Amino acid sequence: MVSQEQKSVDVQVEGCTYPVVIAPTLAGLGASMHVVGKPGRVVLVTNEVVGPLHAEDAERSLGEAGWSPIRVTIPDGEDRKDLHTWRVLVEQILDCGVDRNTPVLALGGGVTGDIAGFAAATVLRGVPFVQVPTTLLAMVDASVGGKVGVNTERGKNLVGAFWQPRLVYAGIATLETLSEAELRCGLGEVLKHTVLVGEAEMQALEIDACALANRDVARLTDWVGRSVACKAGVVAADPREAGVRATLNLGHTLGHAIETVAGFGEIRHGEAVAMGLVAVTRFAEARGWTAPGLARRLSSLASALGLPTQCPNNLDHGALCAAVGFDKKRSRATLTLVVPCAPGRVELRPLPVGEVAELVQFLF
């Protein structure tokens, strides 16, 4: 699986611009690092799964460009994305003798990027950060936008920061090592972005769904670019989630609750987002906020991408309600619910906590 050309999407945010480079392999990583600063030490943070697969390729490219990578390995898995892992990583980075110009580079999926990014934001009150995503989910979503952090027992991403990367470098060939389940996970976020963009984008995804599910490299490369462009536009307009950026949480209020109740890592993020997206659309149709038929269309598209559309029956309704009610986007006794009214048109609607139980019913 090797794409044929390199492309770049610029993200303009908070007075700066950084590129998201979508390339065939990791071979061009070192050359792309010129936007970060002069070559020197770089702390390469990876995990125990990705490191053996891709770290040598990344280190070779960095070395050829004059960088001196120091590899640090952290545990893999959503269940290890916590304050303990972050604390250990911070000490490991400090042991590398870093200064405020030493970049921290995250090589891995969204979990590695979130932990390494939070460490980069806090070590020495902030050092340069580079994202090198190796999963589809991280390429299309987690690596772009500057949201970094860790989970707590109360929910996902409740401790963190906004810390923009200087560079995002996505080598499409790294997707060859993804499992089918991890590929589907990324397609969940592709589906969400497609709903945000509009009708033409949805029709295009309906045409390409089977090809994406079957790992067509040209289609994957194209849709990584489309998703990054969608997120880049939203992030540029609202870098700290004060308004329109909240629309990127489409499907996430319910999705994060599913992940929390199931136990972090038991249900993958993109799968939970797909369940949440279909459920919130069903709920909105029942209330007359959404055009009839959209939920059925989204459910069919999710299925074509290999994604689940209903929550497992063994998850406790009451626990899901409690997790939704603790959502970090809650303000006092009201949630902000992202509702898809039509392709390309979403609304932020207040939902009293007392109505959460009705919303959760649409997951089943």
Image (cartoon, rainbow, N blue to C red):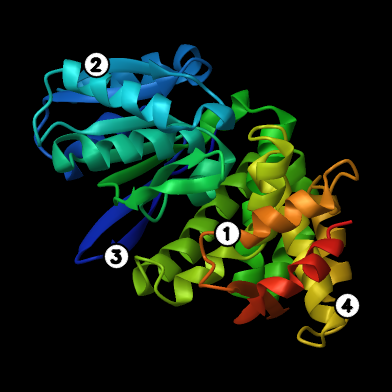
Q: Is residue 102 left or right of residue 308?
A: left
Residue that mark 1 sits on: 327
Q: Residues within 10 Å of mark 4 (few under 14, many from 20)?
A: few
What SS does tag 1 mark?
A: loop
Marks 1/4: CA–CA distance: 28 Å
Q: Look at label 3 and name its amino acid.
A: Gln
Location of the N terminus (image quadrant): top right
Q: Quick check: 195 above or below 93?
A: below
Label 2 vs label 4: CA separation?
53 Å
**Residue, far bottom:** 288
Mark 2 or mark 1, which is nearer the start of the sequence? 2
The image quarter in which residue 361 lies: bottom right
Q: Is residue 151 above or below residue 201?
A: above
Mark 1, mark 4: which one is toward the viewer? 1
In the rendering, at what x and y percent does residue 15 appear?
19, 66
Percent x, y of residue 169: 37, 40
Badge 2 amino acid: Ile
| Amino acid found under the numbered disc labelled 4 | Gly
The answer to whether 88 appears left or right of 321 in the picture is left
The circle on residue 70 is: 2
Q: Nearer the viewer, residue 271 or 317?
A: 317
Left or right of 72, for residue 14: left
Please, what is the three-letter code of the amino acid marked with disc 1? Asp
Say if mark 3 contacts mark 1, CB within 8 Å. no
Q: Is residue 215 visible?
A: no
The quarter of the rendered structure image containing the C terminus is bottom right
Q: Contact, CB < 8 Å: mark 2 with mark 4?
A: no
Residue in the image at 54% along x and 65% along y: 248
- The residue carrying mark 4 is 293
The image quarter containing residue 302 is: bottom right
